[in-house]
Image (cartoon, rainbow, N blue to C red):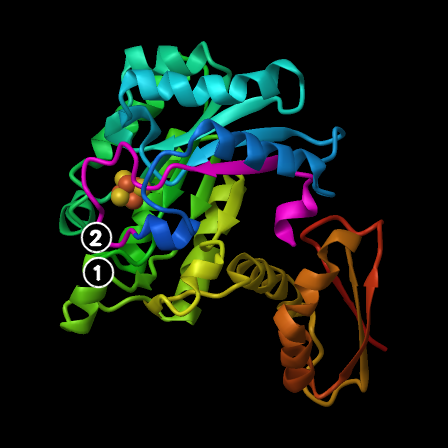
Amino acid sequence: MFEERTRKPLIVPIFIPFQGCPHRCVYCEQEKITDQPAQAPDRAFVEHTLERAIRSPKYDPGRGREIAFYGGTFTRLPLEKMRELLRMVSPYIRKGWFQSVRVSTRPDGVDEERLEVLKTHGVSTVELGTQSMNDRVLALTRRNHTAEDTVKAVRLLRKFGFQTGIQLMPGLPGDSEITFMETVEEVVKLQPDLVRLYPTVVIRGTELARWFEEGHYQPLQLEEGVRVCMKSCKRLEGAGIPVTRMGLMGSPSLKGQIVAGPWHEAFGHLVRSEILFEKIEPHLPRNGQTPKIRLRVSPQEVSLLRGHKNAVIKRVESMTGAGVVEVFPDPSVPKGSPRVEWA
Ligand code: SF4
């Protein structure tokens, strides 16, 4: 999985579904996404979550370990609630079990007073639910904030020394591949520390589902979602901005709740596989030119080059008429630079 390829930190999410949100955004269904009721977790729940994470095989003192408050608008909670939640996790930071805390919030939800609270309670990263940098798309989606709010929020977060993340949603109402790539260009100018891409999916029970059923909204198809995320990911990472997640994570309660849109259990894998395929495509033999092909790839990227359920291998074989005899994990091959060999 891409998530593990750069030894990224273990992020243990504590969900606060819809808490602090000024309204429900038209596409959002946090209860189904997080598999939790729309309420702030209590101390017992927080401690249980963190202790279970510490006992899990993924917990490794040799890698970064963070606690994340996701699923709501953390900095729009009442100040005392923000402090209460942060105090629940602070013993785990003090004892060194986790190194830092991250929160997600809206671009119009940050101010100096609130950032001061985060700063003094071990928060190192703030992720902004920016979704789009196109004001028309934001208005059509009834986000009730503007692109300028993101610009100001990023400036303020920088002033306070936070790592800054930006979450984007291709495929919102009124969006297109062109306007989304303009959004990506605006984000490149802001130089955040990370970006997450969540292509818009239609979840049962949301206003977006009603718009879809009434024919007022058409989501991206899976191939379109993969293509726009591939282009975005290449542009962002080419500008030095890591894309740390693509696609919603599946949860048991989400099963059967996605009415339409580019959802796939391994969405990020699909995108990363396409990026690698693009690298080998110009070097593939013509159809009938050779009976056998060997691919060499960085050991961390073997499964990406094979593709989901060997989709890339099958495509190479059908394009060239050759058999792929091996996908060889070669430590001397740099990441992102697979090689094609044939006689
Ligand atoms: S998208 Fe964010 S701000 Fe909107 S309802 Fe969901 S959690 Fe709240």
Structural crowding at the residue carrying mark 2, measured as other residues with C-alpha within 10 Å and reported as few (<14), some (14–19) or many (≥20): many
Circle 2 — which element? loop
State the residue position of label 1: 208
Quadrant in which the N terminus appears: bottom right
Can see residue 131?
Answer: no
Which quadrant would residue 338 be assigned to in this image? bottom right
Q: Which region is colored magenta?
A: 1-28
Residue 135 is covered by the magenta coloring: no
Mark seen at residue 26:
2
Q: In which quarter of the image is ligand 1?
A: top left
- Residue occupying the point 14% across, 68% down: 216
Tag count: 2
Circle 1 SS class:
helix
Please identify the quadrant where the C terminus is shown: bottom right
Q: Is residue 268 above or below residue 39?
A: below
> x, y percentage for residue 245?
51, 47
Q: Position of residue 35 (x, y in %)?
A: 43, 52
Classify 167 as above or below 80. below
- Residue type at mark 2? Val
Mark 2 or 1 closer to N-term? Answer: 2
